[in-house]
Amino acid sequence: MTTSKNIVKQKEKRRNMKEKKGNEEITCSPTSQEFIECDFEEFESLDSSTSNTHKYTRNHNQLRNLAIMCDRYQICDRAGAVIANAVLQDYGIITQEEDSQIIDRNKLRRSRFSVRKELANEAHETIRDISAIYFDGRKDQTRVLVEREDGHLHQDTSIEEHYTVLSEPGNQERNSNLMAVGADGARVNTGVYNGCIRLLDLEFTKPLHWFICQLHGNELPLRHLFQIIDEKTSGPNSFKGVIGKKLNCDFTCKPIAAYHPLCGKTQLIDCDSLKNLNKDQKCLYNICHAVQTGICSSELALMQPGPIHHARWTTLGNRLLRSYISTIHPTPELSRLVNFIVNYYAPVWFRIKSNPICTDAPKNMFFAISLL
């Protein structure tokens, strides 16, 4: 009996508790609904106010100069956009409140494409007839796909010819006025049967004027004489002989000795031609006059003669001359090489640099022959 009474009491308590909860929900529902409606109205007013103040504005600015500089210095779209945004942020143009001037990489890519197209159209309008073309060869590391033992293709790097294709060649009528071709004196260019210039003659069915680089031809006598006196090369920047091995050192640490000046034919050149010389050529010009006059300045003694490379024989001449003025008793082989540089190599080099026009080529050639 007691258990049944307890069960009945518990049921009554539960019923009373449910009734109380129902009354509380009925009394609280209007206030909660009012709160929800009020909160929603405030949110709508806040949203409308913020939408009026923060309107999205599209960036219509053209990025012509940025696109040209990115193409010039080979900067990708992502890096160019990041650099441009960093500069705008430093100048205060881009802030947390004002972000309409942010440059996206896709916008930069579109600008680069439009600028390239615009420049190509300008070139086609201005350059209608090509009368001469000049080219040069180059070998560099190129990414290639190599098939390995497992039968799959893997990425690798190899040294290959470098080709730069600007656009596909047009019809042959556009190049009907081509008269001259310029290149260096390499055999692949000047070959009688399969040289590049000979193949162009056959392509256009007419003989073209050959403009061969005289500076490149001036390096050949020095190279052959050095290989006869010393020995042949052992790599792209090294030699086998005694003289060649001593040249690959830091000459700024070697003091100037009491060297014997040599009679040379390297003459003074005008200021305009001197400004057009690069660092290695200016070093050759100054050190030749130091060997001829017997006076070497402190600035010239601390000047770097340039690294040894078989594609840059000017630096080899600089190092030979620098080795001569640092030696009290030079060997006959070194004296012979230095004598050839100051009496033939350097005078012909600076004669060509002072008279670079194609009409001066016969005079330059006659001057080189007269020095032999």
Image (tube, rainbow, N blue to C red):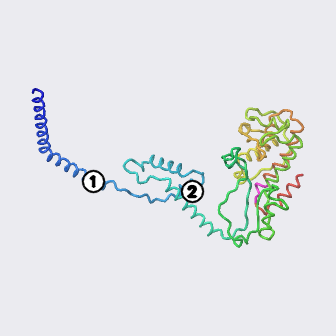
Q: Report the quarter where the N terminus lies.
A: top left
Question: Magenta part of the protein: which range?
Answer: 351-356
> What residue is drawn where x is 71% and y is 47%?
158
Which quadrant holds residue 56? bottom left
Q: Decide which of 170, 337 is in the foreground and name it.
A: 170
Q: Nearer the viewer, residue 231 or 114?
A: 114
The residue nearer to you, when weighing 243 against 177, is 177
Q: For the residue carrying disc 2, how many other residues have a C-alpha within 10 Å: few (<14), some (14-19), or many (20+)?
A: some
| Residue 49: image tag | 1
Magenta: main secondary structure: helix
User: Is 178 within the magenta?
Assistant: no
- What's the amino acid at mark 1? Ser
Please name the residue shown 80% across and 56% down the image: 188
Q: Which mark is residue 68?
A: 2
Residue lying at the far front of the rendered structure: 1
Residue 292 position within the rendered picture, expressed as x and y whole percent measured from the top left: 82, 43
* Residue at disc 1, secondary structure: helix
